[in-house]
Image (cartoon, rainbow, N blue to C red):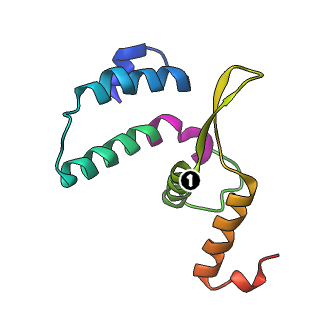
Amino acid sequence: ENGIDDFRSTDTLTFEQYRFYLKNEVFAALPDKMDLDVQLVTEEKLENVCWLICNQPYIERGNQLFSEKCVKQLWRIFCRLAELTHDEDTNSLQVIMAAREVELVCQQFLTCLGTGDSWE
């Protein structure tokens, strides 16, 4: 988090700026080979920074149904399943998840909870 503050010295950071920061400041500093344990710790640290940067709209909302911990877990699922695409019209990158994939994930989640029979 401090590295990002030093990098941009602003309260906001665009997705493109964050990608640039990761590529040039974070990933460039990593060794070519790492033990699995080190990889997992590094991944967790990076994920925590990503959550710190983007969590505000997800945790500061009205009518909260889920705790912050649950929201972070749902965010993690989305991040694992989402795809990075290029929008030709706006010439920007978007992170999306196909509607059918969202439906399947939700259905499987409800099935694991034992309420999958009620899915319509």
Q: Residue furthest right?
A: 120
Quarter of the figure with the N terminus:
top left
Q: Which residue is label 1 attached to?
A: 81
* Residue 56 among magenta residues: yes
Of residue 7 and residue 108, the one placed in the foreground of this image is 108
Q: Residues within 10 Å of mark 1 (few under 14, many from 20)?
A: some
Q: Is residue 28 above or below residue 76?
A: above
Residue at image position (35%, 40%) is 46
The residue range painted magenta reads: 51-59
Check disc 1 and give the amino acid type. Answer: Leu
Within the image, what quadrant is residue 3 found in? top left
Residue 83: x percent and y percent? 59, 43
**Left or right of 35: which side holds 113?**
right
| 42 left or right, relative to 10 | left
Q: Main secondary structure of the magenta part?
A: helix
Q: Would residue 12 be seen by someone viewing this image from the given angle?
A: no
Residue 110's x, y, as percent? Answer: 65, 76
> Can see residue 79?
yes
